[in-house]
Amino acid sequence: MKKHLVKFFILINLICLTSFALAQDVKGETDMDTLKPKILIAYYSYSGNTRAVAEAIRQETGGVLFEIKSNHAYPESYRDMTKQAQEEIKAGFRPVLTGQVDNMGQYDVVFIGSPNWWGTITPHISSFLAQYDLNGKTVVPFITHGGGGVQNTVRDLSVQCKGCKVSEKAWVGYGNETEGVRDWIKAVKILP
């Protein structure tokens, strides 16, 4: 009988110690999770180039992707499309967006991606910035272009993003170029 009691107490002690160790491991993971910022990657992509960069950012950060869309259509002809986009930008056009971000308040960092259209961000990005309160959030721009570089894209995004902290380290890439995204994410210093 004594042997069984000793074995029983040893077993109980082992169970308690194992439970305590497991609780410490879970606690450690939870502490790390609370240090990691909640990240949203919002982007508008006409041709797929900005989408490719957004997906590369998601792979590096584990953030949530959100494609900015509208029912607003553009002509299939590239020349006609760029002409329409230029006219819309000059007129300050803001398309009505379809879909919405669930609980924007949960995000600490918002990556915002836009093609460079006529030296600035697209009307879709302007609509997004007008629709959501990003006050107090860190906003990290990423810009794709077909040869125009950054031009006024980041400046215009910063002006429209009221109360948010826009990172000075924007990603600017030609076409769907994603090489260097990992190093850029490290340089932005948003992950612990």
Image: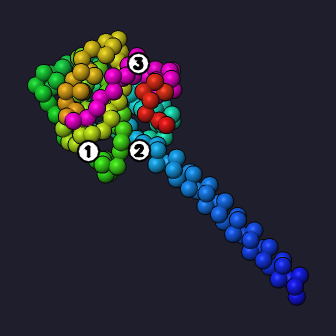
Q: Which mark is residue 173?
A: 3
Q: Nearer the viewer, mark 3 or mark 1?
A: 3
Eye-nearest disc, 2 or 1: 2
Q: Quadrant of residue 148?
A: top left
Task: Please indicate whether residue 22 sits to the left or right of residue 159 in the image.
Answer: right
Does residue 174 show up magenta in the picture?
yes
**For residue 165, what is the image quadrant?**
top left
Asked if the residue at tag 1 contacts the one at tag 2, i.e. Cβ–Cβ closer than 8 Å, the answer is no
Q: Secondary structure at mark 1?
A: strand
Measured Cα–Cα span from mark 3 to mark 1? 27 Å
Which residue, given by chain and number where applicable, does mark 1 sit on?
98
Q: Residue 38 shows which numbered tag?
A: 2
Question: Over which residues does the magenta segment extend?
Answer: 163-185
Relative to the observer, which residue lies in front, 155 or 123?
A: 155
Q: Position of residue 116 (x, y in %)?
A: 29, 20
Looking at the image, what colour scheme do you see?
rainbow
- The image position of residue 34, as x and y in percent, is 46, 49
Q: Position of residue 46 (x, y in %)?
A: 33, 28
Circle 1 residues within 10 Å: few <14, some 14–19, many ≥20: few
Q: Between residues 75 and 184, which one lies in front from this camera angle? A: 184
Looking at the image, residue 129 sits to the left or right of residue 189; the answer is: left
Disc ID at residue 86: none
Q: Residues within 10 Å of mark 3 (few under 14, many from 20)?
A: many
Element on which disc 3 rests:
strand
At label 2, the amino acid type is: Lys
Which residue is located at x 46 percent, y 44 percent? 35
Q: CA distance from mark 2 to mark 3?
A: 24 Å
Mark 2 residue element: loop
